[in-house]
Image: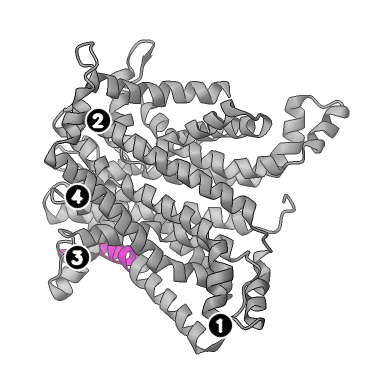
Amino acid sequence: MALPVAFFAVFFAWPVVSIVDHGLRPDGDWRFGRIGETLSRPDILDVLGFTAWQALASTGLTLLVALPGAYVFARFDFPGKGVLRAVVTVPFVLPTVLVGTAFLALVGRNGLTDELWGLRLDTSVWAILLAHVFFNYAVVVRTVGGLWSQLDPRQEEAARVLGASRFTAWRTVTLPALVPAVSAAALMVFLFTFTSFGVVQILGGDAYTTLEAEIYRQTARLLDLPTAAVLTLVQFAAVGAILALHAWTVRRRETALRLVPPERTARRPRGAGQWALLGGVLLSVALLILLPLGVLVERSFAGPGGYGLGYYRALGSLDESGTFLVPPLEAIGNSLRYALAATAIAVVIGGLAAAALTRRAGRLVRGFDALLMLPLGVSAVTVGFGFLITLDEPPLDLRASWILVPLAQALVGVPFVVRTMLPVLRAVDERLREAAAVLGASPWRAWREVDLPLVRRALLIAAGFAFAVSLGEFGATVFIARPDSPTLPVAVARLLGRPGELNYGQAMALSTILMVVCAVSLLLLERLRTDRTSGEF
């Protein structure tokens, strides 16, 4: 646990505490009265109210749209199911900046709906809600559908034999079993939408602001650290409560159910009703997921003189405004290098943390487990700005170093590595390690010969998730990425923030490139998940 604890202490706790300290103790004396002053301001209350409202609305709308999809993927077997499952997961690994860009191309100025019907939604809250559904659809399908596919259908069939109607059997047998999974999915969706930044920044503009976007405005534009510190504490407390409730529901889901293999529950649709349900889900996936991505790609090729590669070619040259010190195309190489470095850091730190969590027990380790999840509950904007004010003097003067960006990205990647590897490590039979030790193997050789072959695939999947998450990190990177080394999300945001058709087209082109890279990473993950040629498990 030593290296992960040191990593989080230096690169997470120190920057966050420094921000709070600068904000609430500017002259050496604590001023807790600023908490009440800030929370009583009408503009801040409006931000807090809108943040909670849009998170609740996004969560409810996501459940309404995605639960039928979860049922279809869990209970139906149809051609192309594996590919479609990967497709609906693509939005979740995309950067939120790209999600906002895709919906801007669909419902924004000069977007598809604007050209066809003169309808713009980028100035309304509906664009934000729809983008959140687009982003979180896979959370519900994976979480609820994964459990639903393993519930024994014979229990519901037994209720039908005893005289219950189809709805009564579902309500009394299946629904209670699904409640923990639905609750867990709802809490995760609420968490992601409560801390939404990139989507709101692009689609909300000045009309709609969430807590995360307001923290960015207070720090980057107004330099009002006291207000930013108070808002950071509020967000931390709210998300901490959400994560605690989420952990409780996950424990309940894992211990309360007896499951069967998924291949025993899926079958071909039967009857007109089931085929209609399958068709409706496919239509919703096409409209909600494929259409925004397709419009984004189409806009990247649609130049003033017709379709072509003009916007892509323009990425290789400097503009006259001086916004970029290097051609925007160089952001691709920067993002890949940063993401690879961040992945290596996240795999080392997360792998050691997961190994520690499998070998120890007690309150200390439970607290360590909670610590690993904290980066998901604290504003990335706060972490990024904290890096600038803490890591600027010896012995850790990193403000001019390229490693600062991968370190910030790795903070978000570590929780994904831990959650991917931990279940597999816990499943390794301790007697195998003991047998290796009896035969004379050192602890290192026992791990290399016993654990590594069993967890190799999980390690690759964890690395893939860390890479995708690092590639799209925006909140912290927008503060610490140097002007001559922008990442893809930062470059897209800069292009969208400037007027002109060329800048808009280049943003679409960069977003398409970023989408392709993320999609390829996800498809490789799916191949690792579904590969049955190896007998590792």
Viewed as shown, does residue 416 lie left or right of 34? right
Q: How packed is label 2: few (under 14 Cα within 10 Å), some, or many (20 or more)?
A: many
The disc, 4 or 2, on the residue closer to the chain's N-terminal end is 2
Residue 384, placed above or below residue 87? above
Q: Which mark is residue 165?
A: 1
Instruction: For marks 2 and 1, give the CA distance.
Output: 53 Å
Question: What residue is pinned by disc 2?
Answer: 230
Helix, strand or loop under label 4: helix
Instruction: For marks 4 and 2, give the CA distance.
Output: 30 Å
Q: Position of residue 10 (x, y in %)?
A: 42, 21
The disc, 3 or 1, on the residue closer to the chain's N-terminal end is 3
Question: What residue is pinned by disc 3?
Answer: 111
Residue at image coords 75%, 26% = 443
Residue at image coords 11%, 53% = 500
- At label 2, which amino acid type do we have? Val
The magenta stretch is 291-304
Instruction: For marks 1 and 4, give the CA distance.
Output: 54 Å
Residue at image coords 11%, 50% = 499
Q: How packed is label 4: few (under 14 Cα within 10 Å), some, or many (20 or more)?
A: some
Of all residues shown, which one is farthest toward the bottom? 272
Number of the front mark, 2 or 1 = 1
- At label 3, which amino acid type do we have? Gly
Viewer can see residue 459: no
* Contact, mark 1 vs mark 4 (Cβ under 8 Å): no
Residue 101, placed above or below residue 399? below
Q: How packed is label 1: few (under 14 Cα within 10 Å), some, or many (20 or more)?
A: few
Instruction: For marks 3 and 1, give the CA distance.
Output: 47 Å
- At label 4, which amino acid type do we have? Leu
